[in-house]
Image (tube, helix red, strand yellow):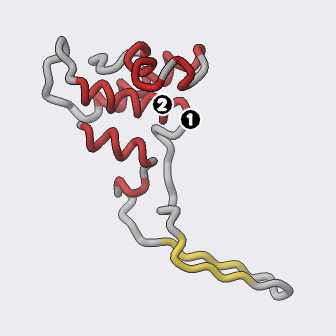
Amino acid sequence: MITYVTCDDVDNAFGNGWTSENAKNKAVLMANAWLNGFNLKINPSRIPEEVKLAGAYAARIASFGKLFQQKNDSGVVISKAVSADGVSVSKSFAELPANSTALLEPDLQLAIALL
C-alpha cells in the first residue's frame, strides 16, 4: 500500500488537535487505504501537495468515523408530513444514485475534487 499522507501532513493541514493522539494512526491508515482505492498514477516518492491535502481531509473525516460510513438516503428531505392523534409520519428524500458523491461529507467531496 502506498503511503500518500502521514500524521505530520494532517497535523500541518489542521493543527495537532484534529483528533486525539491515539486515534491519529488509524485515521491516517484509513485515509491511505481510501486513497489507494483510486489507483492514482503518481510517483510514490513525490506525492503532490493536492493529494496530501486530500488525504488530510480524508483522515479528518475518518477520525469522525465517517470515511467508510454507509449512507441509506441523501439526507435531503423534499417533503415531510406529521399527524398527531392518528399517529402518522412521512418523509420523502431527494432521489440520488447510491454512489452519488452528493451523499458524501462536504470535506470528502473536496478531497475527491483535489484528486
User: What type is the residue that disc 2 sits on?
Assistant: Arg
Q: In the figure, is residue 59 to the left or right of 51?
A: right
Q: What's the residue at 58%, 14% (across, down)?
A: 21
Label 1: how many Cα within 10 Å (few below 14, some 14–19, many 20+) = few
Label 2: element kind: helix
Q: What's the residue at 17%, 15% (across, down)?
A: 46
Label 1: element kind: loop
Image quarter in which the N terminus is found: top left
Label 2: how many Cα within 10 Å (few below 14, some 14–19, many 20+) = many
User: What type is the residue that disc 1 sits on?
Assistant: Phe
Q: Position of residue 32 (x, y in %)?
A: 35, 24
Examine the rendered structure and indicate whether residue 27 appears above or below residue 98: above
Q: Position of residue 22 (x, y in %)?
A: 60, 14
Examine the rendered structure and indicate whether residue 108 appears above or below residue 92: above
Q: In the figure, is residue 23 to the left or right of 28?
A: right
Q: What's the residue at 38%, 57% (across, down)?
A: 102
Residue 64's label in the rendered image is 1
Residue reaching furthest to the bottom? 86
Q: What's the residue at 25%, 30% (across, down)?
A: 50
Cα–Cα gap, marks 1 and 2: 7 Å
Residue 26's label in the rendered image is none
Camera-side residue of 77 and 37: 77
Q: Position of residue 28 (x, y in %)?
A: 43, 21
Camera-side residue of 70 and 57: 57
Camera-side residue of 53 and 38: 53
Mark 1 near mark 2, Cβ–Cβ under 8 Å?
Answer: yes
According to the image, label 2 marks what residue? 60
Q: Position of residue 2 (x, y in %)?
A: 27, 18
Image quarter in which the C terminus is found: top left
Q: In the figure, is residue 64 to the left or right of 39?
A: right
Task: Tell me how many marks there are.
Answer: 2
Write down the quadrant of residue 12 in the picture: top left
